[in-house]
Image (cartoon, rainbow, N blue to C red):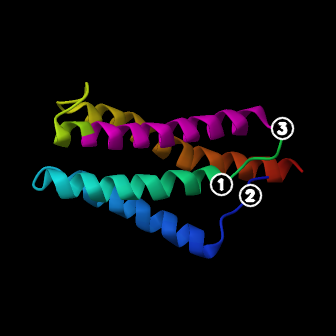
Amino acid sequence: MMTELTKTQLLLQQIAAVAMLIGAAMFMFLPLWGTVVFTVGAVVFVPLQMLQRYEGRNFVLRRLRRQQLLGGIALLCAACCMIMQVGRFGFAIRNEWVVCLAVASILELYTAFRIPAELKKEDAEH
């Protein structure tokens, strides 16, 4: 059983996801503001995602949940790499954030479809 977010938390998470999308697109034209918008979105999105927990014993759901958390960490890494690129410090002075964002997007998208399907299958078995 997955713990559900409240309606307010869910709305905030959706707004943060849209902010990350807008921030990533803004980065091409306004790198500083794109970084700020993306980072704020990631810093709000990931902790809210971590509030959702899986309490059951289904191995597949546990694996998917770990992949989802790994995707959240990759989002935060993308934000850090964006900050390094804009500030011209550290190791990420090119477009390393794009790689982190691509990894995060694949993991988040995959788990967004697989977790509900697996939860539905688990409910049908019980």
Determine which residue is flagged by label 2: 3
Instruction: Place residue 85 in its image quadrant.
Output: top left
Q: Earlier in the sequence, mark 1 or mark 3?
A: 1
Q: Position of residue 110 (x, y in %)?
A: 51, 41
* Bounds of the magenta segment: 57-83
Left or right: 112, with 100 as reference point: right
**Towards the viewer: 110 or 22:** 22
Looking at the rendered structure, the secondary structure element under dot 2 is loop
Q: Residues within 10 Å of mark 1 (few under 14, many from 20)?
A: few
Question: Could you tell me if the residues under marks 1 and 3 are in contact, i.e. CB atoms within 8 Å?
Answer: no
Query: Which of label 2 and label 1 is nearer to you?
Result: 1
Amino acid type, residue under disc 2 in the picture = Thr
Determine which residue is flagged by label 3: 57
- At horizontal 54% and vertical 49% (from top left) the residue drawn is 112
- At horizontal 13% and vertical 50% (from top left) the residue drawn is 28
Question: Could you tell me if the residues under marks 2 and 1 are in contact, i.e. CB atoms within 8 Å?
Answer: yes
